[in-house]
Amino acid sequence: MTRFTAEQLEAARDRLVPDVVADGLHVLFCGINPSLMTAATGHHFARPGNRFWPVLHLSGFTPRLMKPSEQGELPSCGLGITNVVARATARADELSAEEYREGGRLLTAKVARLRPRWLAVVGVTAYRAAFDDRKAQVGPQERVIGGTRVWVLPNPSGLNAHWTAATMAQEFARLRVAAEAQESAEG
């Protein structure tokens, strides 16, 4: 992996990182916002301590452990990635409440346009802020956007010590099973 200087990472602040999307995905994963490392590389969940890619594989969503640089292969697996807030920051706590609310509005429009079967927001705090749902917990939500069901997953950041990679993979796998069951039912 390329090593970036502090100056190079800081230069990536506020950069936008393109979504990895297609119409009709099985699951559209939604991060909080890009890290500076993600913005510097152009690859989602690129910080070395982030557990998204290992958990995606451990949960059975991908046939092998993928690198962030292979994110373009996700749509062929029926998966995509976007963010609640598009701008890159060093830490999610740099985002304002209004950015989260606006991100929730923009995400709703994006989901309505792309029509994934499931929207999976990785981070319950971000979901609560974006959708003004203070009582949300990890797991399936009552909210539906068009025909898209919503699931909140644990934040895969290495800073989230409440969840191990194994327990995160179990929750991601619950979503995978639900998505597969929905696909089977729809034929």
Image (cartoon, helix red, strand yellow):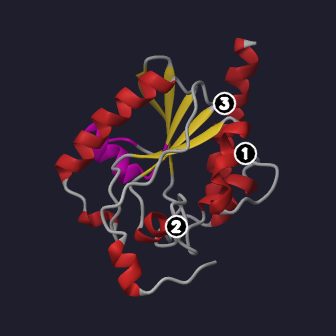
* Secondary structure under the numbered disc 2 in the rendered image: helix
How far across and how far down the image is residue 4, in percent? 49, 82
Q: Indicate whether residue 32 is drawn in magenta.
A: no
Q: Nearer the viewer, mark 2 or mark 3?
A: 2
x and y percentages locating residue 42 in the rendered image: 51, 61
Tell me residue 164's x, y (percent): 61, 67
Q: Where is the N terminus found, in terms of image quarters?
A: bottom right
The residue wearing badge 2 is 41
User: Are dots 2 and 3 in contact, CB under 8 Å?
Assistant: no
Upstream in sequence: badge 2 or badge 3: 2
Q: Check disc 3 and report its element: helix, strand or loop.
A: helix
**Which residue corresponds to the image point at 50% horizontal and 17% vertical from the top-left?**
147
Does 164 sit left or right of 142 as displayed? Answer: right
Residue 127: in magenta span: yes
- Residue type, mark 1 in image: Phe
Residue 24 falls left or right of residue 113? right
Q: Toward the viewer: 12 or 60? A: 12
* The magenta segment: 121-136
Residue 108 seen from this side:
yes
Residue annotated with mark 3? 179
Q: Nearer the viewer, residue 88 or 52?
A: 88
Rate crowding at label 3 as few (under 14), some (14 to 19) or many (20 or more) other CA atoms within 10 Å. some
Q: Is 68 situated left or right of 11 in this image? A: right
> Could you give the CA–CA distance between mark 1 and mark 3, rounded to whole angstroms?
10 Å
Label 1 belongs to which residue? 61
1 or 2: tag closer to the N-terminus: 2
Which residue is pictured at 42% across the width and 59% down the height?
34
Q: x, y (%) of residue 107?
A: 37, 35
- Give the amino acid type for the residue marked by disc 3 in the picture: Ala
